[in-house]
Image (tube, helix red, strand yellow):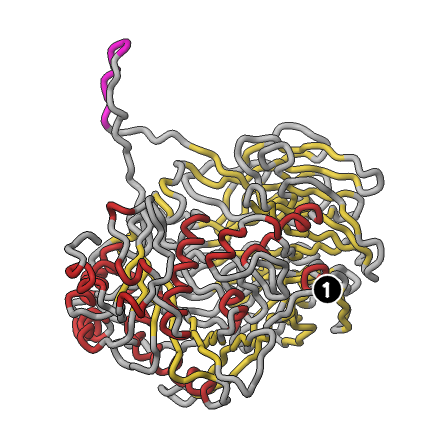
Amino acid sequence: MKALKNTAILVSLLFLTCFGVKAQVSNQLEMLDIFNLEYVSDPQISPDGQQIIYVRNFKDIMNDQNLSNLWIARFDGSQNRPLTTGEQSDRSPRWSHDGKKIIYTSSKSGKSEIYLRWMDSGDEMVLVNSEKSPSNVTWSPDDKHLAFSMFVPKTKVSPIKMPAAPKGAKWNSPPKYIDELSWRRDGVGELPHGNQQLFTVPVSGGTPRQITDTAFDHGSAVWGKDGKHLYFSANMRADKDFEGSDSDIYSISLSTGELNKLTSRYGPDGNPTISPDGKKMAYLGYDDKYNGYQISRLYIADIDGKNSQLVSGKLDRDVGSIKWASDGKGLYFQYVDKSHTKIAYITTKGKVSDITEGLGGVSLGRPYTSGAFSIADNGNYAYTWAETYEPSDLGVGNKGNNRRVTKVNEDLFDYKQLGSVEEIWYKSSADGLDINGWIVKPADFDPNKKYPMIAYFYERRSNSLHSHPSPAPSASTINIPYYVSNDYLVLVPDIKYEVGYPGKSAMDHVVPATKAVMAMGFVDEDNMAIQGQSWGGYQVAHMVTRTNLYKAAGAGAPVVNMTSAYGGVRWASGMSRMFQYEKTQTRLGATLWDRPDLYIENSPLFKVPEIETPMFIMHNDADGAVPWYQGIEFYMSLRRLQKPAWLVSYNDEAHNLTRRKNRKDLSIRMAQFFNHYLKGEPMPEWMAYGLPAKLKGRTLRYDLVDETEEKVTEGESLKLEKTKGGQH
């Protein structure tokens, strides 16, 4: 890992130059620093609470891929050292109950395999060697067997029997027979036919035994304390494609294969966890009422599923990562409260006690809530220690007495100036409630200086306060570390939604958050912008039809016409889009025919004449989530009315960009757009003259225009083309 980190700064200087960064060691975070960053994930404490194995994640700059090794440390922080090494992905370590062995998965052979390791000798053996990747591996109570899940392909037989081709004939490929509603995935493409099935394998070695063989996907399995049953969740409805979230918990006998359904309410039940005495089962779920968002709650039932009781009813937060206490009197769990991810304990009667907070940071990408922990019988726990300004490290503790064990990025952050992240609170314009958000400031922040500011939003991002967007080319949104390193403020506000009025809800929260930061005195109020992708892109498009507070705006993959989008499908899966407008993310609460007024009121397209804000739009022709024509409708409408707008579209790219070269290109163009409007930098050629299809692949047009000679002003691309005789 360190050898890679020492070479990271020597390459791709062209890319840095495009961003105006000098080709020398800088004390500011740069795009290539993504290859220097590491983070800790999946800490697993030994049964006696004295050792922790954790995953140390790093990147390969030469092959542009994510890698990881296993490390081990004592609970007191001593003897911190690698357990595995190499250019591979080692992950998911799990201790045996006696603490003498571990299992983990690794790609060291070129494919994912399950390895067994004896901790006293360091000897290893491959337990499962398969073409498909095993996952969710768990130990049996006697440590003699493992259970795991693995994809099992099935051949799809067409109902039409095609004749055999004559010998030597070169026929076209036969048609594909598809009868599933969800058969593609955005960024992945067509899905293989088959299902996730459950297996067991002896630790002594042998052939894996397939336990399930149904036409449904089976969730990760846990062992019953008798060692004779597995418990798992699955959606086995005949209409599962229409009711995708209605899962139940099942048990299966390892000796007879008998399958028993243990829960039956309408809604998602999952994450079964068996009590130490084997008599109770805890699980997570809720009664599905088709709301846009519902809280995942904790339930406890008898081992046969009877006498289920809601335990966490008094806690108005999602419950996750449940683990029984050794005495069976309660459970440890993880939840997020006002931006902070916590470990807590809940009794079987529902009394909650916080143990510690500050979990997070187990990703280097888009800012989502994260964090992980494990706990031993003696109460010692290990967790991903998070700070707002750096990715996760290893933390340990007992009863809230915590200690940081690692500083995996110390060699980088010792000479890098880091920005600061601060929580903010503001009043919702809708109901006056206090709403949470956060603001990121440059490393050398001066409160007496005026900074341009960009607000980035989606739904609620305060819960991701301890997650870390990497300083890397973006797949769709502004890259927060890059902009902060270039003297921008970045505001990330939360949005609380009113059913029927998602666009107004964005206005009622983003604008008050913006004004709350403006009141602090260090914002350049004449140079502010907003940016969002997908649902965030829709909200940006809606907001610019209602306010001129912002000087520029970026909308990625925005829905702008809900009347046309309502009748479409999600191209990645073939699923109808109607559900998300009626009941889920869009939250209109009615069909198009019941309330056409809501569909029109919330559609930015019908208010395009009101827009005065310059727009940067990204929408790709292989977007499987939001139909490409939505971005086209928006751009064509803006240009028809001679509004300043630019559309970038990447061929064969998904909802979020997957190819690194395209991510670099988007990052450069978006930065040039905002730098032009918020910092007064010259307009680049692609903004001034466009980039026609006939020139794609021949030029990038990043160069800045000499505006004193060309007299280029915003939005005059069409005039320039006419004066140049159409040559551009």
Q: Disc count in the image?
A: 1
Quarter of the image where one finds residue 550:
bottom left
Q: Is residue 166 shown in magenta?
A: yes
Q: Which residue is mark 1?
A: 395
**Residue 278 percent across, percent down from the top left:** 66, 54
- In the displayed structure, does residue 361 sit left or right of residue 267? right
Q: Residues within 10 Å of mark 1 (few under 14, many from 20)?
A: many
**Residue 343 percent across, percent down from the top left:** 65, 69
Residue 66 can be seen, yes or no? yes
Residue 240 can be seen, yes or no? no
Disc 1 element: strand
Q: Is residue 414 shown in magenta?
A: no
Quarter of the image where one finds residue 227:
top right
The structure residue drawn at horizontal position 75% and vertical position 39%, both measured from the top left corner, is 117
- In the displayed structure, does residue 139 sit left or right of residue 289? right
Q: Which residues are magenta?
A: 160-168
- In the displayed structure, does residue 603 sit left or right of residue 438? left
The structure residue drawn at horizontal position 68% and vertical position 34%, both measured from the top left corner, is 202
Q: Is residue 385 above or below residue 82?
A: below
| Amino acid, disc 1 | Gly
Q: Main secondary structure of the magenta part?
A: loop
